[in-house]
Image (cartoon, rainbow, N blue to C red):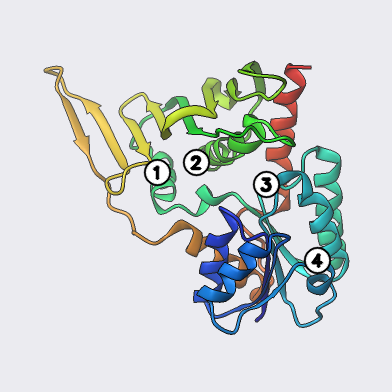
Amino acid sequence: MKIAVIGTGSWGKNLVRNFYELGVLKIVCDLEEDNLTKARERYPNLLTTSSLKDVIDDKEIDGIVIATPAHTHYEIAKQSLEAGHNVYVEKPLAQNVTEAKELHAIAENKNLTLMVGHLLLYHPAVNKLKQIIASGDLGTVRYVNSDRRNFTANHRKHSNVMWDLAPHDFSMMCYILNTEPEKIVNVRTWASSGDSIDVAHIDILFPNNIGGHIHNSWLDPQKQALLTVNGSRKTAVLNDTFKENKLEIYSRQEDGSLTVEKPVYSNDEPLRLECRHFLDCIEHKRKPTSDSVNGYQVVKYVETCQNFIH
């Protein structure tokens, strides 16, 4: 199997590393010559190009991995699919539901794999939490809160904090609850300078009266990736900034004290698991966990949030 990676920047370089170590990476494409030079120096015998056409026209390529800026995802994915390539595109799949639907239709008509990089669906701690919720150990889920923050000094011209961070939260919440939101209740945003939204608060209603909240920020120098799931019996806390014991389960005893459980899960790198999943889906014609339907749904939720502020 031969894979190409388009975009080798801050996140793309991680995909390059994984697919190279999996023994399937043939070529990388980037407009920045410095990025290509670094790739050649680190990975012997790796082909590089600054021409998208070189990759699209290569009939030996089985899958194209797209890690370019979000506003380019739709056009590059469309060209790749129309040329007959399986595609893995980083989130979001597109920047509106019309484009997301079109990409899904092309992939379906050509019987190609179209997978979206919703990384947290492959995270061992997230999957352990999903199992715990399904087992009923937390009791009835009542509220889910996701707090995702980082420090983005240079605000992105073609995006905002919701398009950048909320796809992680929406995809993870829907996955662990095994359901879709009934309604986006309210959206509050803040632009610290100009028109670039860099803080967002999103209130969500899930079926069975489960409340949800997403907080995204580009203004916090202390990175945060914290998910809390409140149940009628116990509360789960998943802190992805921790190196170990990311997942803890809290329960209050009759004497008022708190008991903390630390579930065991694998230490496999989520991105490595995601990359292997893409290869497996191509080889065996399986539907990805984060398929184009999942990608479309997340785009729909974020676009709905965007409509609140127009």
- Report crowding for label 4: few under 14, some 14 to 19, many 20 or more residues within 10 A (C-alpha): some
- The residue at which mark 3 appears reads as 294
Q: CA distance from mark 1 to mark 3?
A: 19 Å
Q: Amino acid at mark 3?
A: Asn
Looking at the rendering, in which quadrant would you find the C terminus?
top right
Q: Residue at x 64, y 30 (%)?
A: 162
Sequence-wise, the earlier of marks 1 and 3 is: 1
Q: Amino acid at mark 1?
A: Leu
Sequence-wise, the earlier of marks 1 and 2 is: 1
45 horizontally vs 293: left or right: left
Q: Is 272 located above or below residue 174 in the figure?
A: below
56 horizontally vs 148: left or right: right
Looking at the rendering, in which quadrant would you find the N terminus?
bottom right
Element at label 4: helix
Relative image position of residue 49 (x, y in whole percent): 73, 72
Q: Which mark is residue 176?
A: 2
Verify CB contact (< 8 Å) between mark 2 and mark 3.
no
- The residue at which mark 4 appears reads as 52
Verify CB contact (< 8 Å) between mark 1 and mark 2.
yes
Q: Amino acid at mark 4?
A: Leu
Q: CA distance from mark 4 to mark 3?
A: 27 Å
- The residue at which mark 1 appears reads as 129
Verify CB contact (< 8 Å) between mark 4 and mark 3.
no
